[in-house]
Image (cartoon, rainbow, N blue to C red):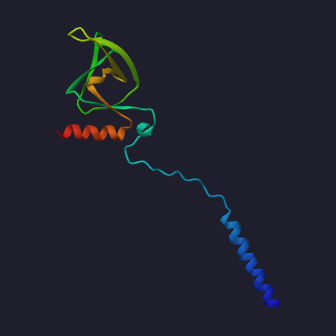
Amino acid sequence: MRSRRFLSGLFLLLALSLLFSSCRRKAEEAIDFGLPGEEPLDYLPGVEWAVIMDPVAAFREDAGFENKVLQHARRGDVLMVTGKKISSVKDSDGTVRVVTWYGFDRGWLVEDSLSIYGNRMNARAAASKLLER
């Protein structure tokens, strides 16, 4: 009888110690799901990425061909879009067409010089395929 009490008490003590040890709050650990070289903006919804398609593209001071050229970009460059403007342009034959200008840190480029992507990974993949040719 005494050994039975002892064993049941020992079993209760072990069960309680296991129960309380598993309820301890564990320290939070940050889990890094990203690949090396990725930045937080790479997959952020609403952030667009552009790949330069022309051999050389001229960044303008503002949206419009009449504005001053600031810098140049080369085919395959991947850039984050920072702005967008829609304007009308008169072609050499006199027809008027609507074009979209995209803003970047370095200036503005017309849509004809670019391909736009929803994330940086897709833009980089397109740029590598473009440069393979």
Q: Is residue 28 above or below residue 19?
A: above
Q: Position of residue 41 (x, y in %)?
A: 43, 36
Q: Residue at x 42, y 48 (%)?
A: 34
Which residue is farthest right?
Answer: 1
Q: Residue at x 71, y 74 (%)?
A: 15
Image mark count: 0
Name the residue nearer the viewer: 34 or 50: 50
Which residue is farthest left?
Answer: 133
Residue 27 relative to residue 77: left or right = right
Confirm whether residue 62 shows in the render.
no
Which residue is farthest front?
Answer: 95
Name the residue nearer the viewer: 95 or 71: 95
Confirm whether residue 21 shows in the render.
yes
Name the residue nearer the viewer: 107 or 110: 110
Q: Position of residue 27 (x, y in %)?
A: 60, 55
| Quarter residue 53 falls in | top left
- Look at the image and tell me in which quarter the C terminus lies: top left
Q: Position of residue 47 (x, y in %)?
A: 42, 32
Q: Is residue 93 above or below residue 50?
A: above
| Quarter residue 50 falls in | top left
Q: Residue at x 28, y 38 (%)?
A: 126
Q: Is residue 84 above or below residue 1?
A: above
Q: Residue at x 28, y 9 (%)?
A: 66
- Look at the image and tell me in which quarter the N terminus lies: bottom right
